[in-house]
Image: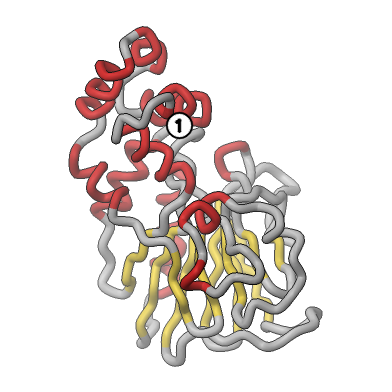
Amino acid sequence: MSLLKKIATGLGLSGPVYRGKPGMRAYAIGDVHGCLTQLNAMLDRIEQDVSGYAGTAYLILLGDIVDRGPDSCGVVERLRTYQHPALRKMMLMGNHEEFLLRALDGEAGTLRRWLEFGGAECIASYGLSAQRLLAAEEDDAVAMLHNAIPAAHITFLSEFGDTLRFGDYLFVHAGIRPGLALDQQSHADLRWIRDPFLTHRGDYGFMVVHGHTISDTVDEQTNRIGIDTGAYRGGPLTALVVENTERRYLSIGGQSGRGLP
């Protein structure tokens, strides 16, 4: 199921009118979390939507493409190899990609915590059980992890960025820390923050578009938009489309009553 909703920026909301880059369009997809079926349907929907568009269009993944859901391996391979002539692919780093990469680097104690954090489902999609990893010595378990996950996948994940500015919009996985300039933000906050970002109502000077924190519907505030609608736990997979002063949403799947507002 696919649902499209148009919202004119500023209507029904106080605050400034936000604009994307002139002559460009952005498609930002929220947390996929291993949900390959929904991702494929969303990519199909975006390809239909962008058909005939004459400008430059960006496809932005907001991070957390891995863990929790059934097919992280399939999602990584799909996005690693995905190309479309009308779309420029941009990948942003989520806390789950960071945690996986830290486990692969052999950071002490991280592998076990990652497995409890959604990594068990991730590694199962690569044909390796969490039980085997937990039964092994940590160094041996890290080696098993490297043997299971293709080097091309590790390289792909390690190259993700942290933010993307698109006109008056900032795309990021988790959010930003209020009161700090963008160039002073830490990787930890960009990938992990909730409060005080979620409760802050001040003007950042741009609209922050983020995932990371699940909401049943799009969480549109005057200074931020959250588009993680919990695909891995039965909610829809959501994408935000920004073009000039207009924004609209695409929604794929989800249980009855859990679509867009």
Residue 10 position within the rendered picture, expressed as x and y whole percent measured from the top left = 72, 84
Q: Residue at x 54, y 77 (%)?
A: 169
The residue lying toward the viewer, choosing from 107 and 149, is 107
Instruction: Give the left or right position of residue 75, taking residue 144 as reference.
Output: right
Residue 171 pos. (x, y %): 50, 68
Name the foreground residue: 241 vs 177.
177
Note whether 130 is above or below 203 in the view shown: above
Residue that appears at 28% across and 57% down: 82
| Residue wearing tag 1 | 70
How far from the left and from the top, in percent, is residue 206?
60, 80
* Amino acid beneath label 1: Pro
Foreground pick, 59 / 119? 119
Quadrant of res 232: top right
Up/down of 181 relative to 79, above or below: below
The answer to whether residue 27 is above or below residue 33 is below
Give the residue at the far top of this rendering: 135
Give the image's coloring scheme: secondary structure
User: Count the marks: how many?
Assistant: 1
Determine if residue 2 is in view: no
Q: Secondary structure at mark 1?
A: loop
- Residue 237 shows in this picture: yes
Which residue is rendered at x = 34% and y = 11% of the image?
132
User: Could you tell me which quadrant the C terminus lies in?
Assistant: bottom right
Classed neighbour count for the residue bearing mark 1: other residues with Cα under 10 Å, few (<14), some (14–19), many (≥20): many
Where does the image place residue 188, in percent across and percent down from the top left? 50, 52
Q: Quadrant of residue 210?
A: bottom right
On screen, residue 5 versus residue 132, left or right, reads: right
Q: Residue at x 58, y 64 (%)?
A: 176
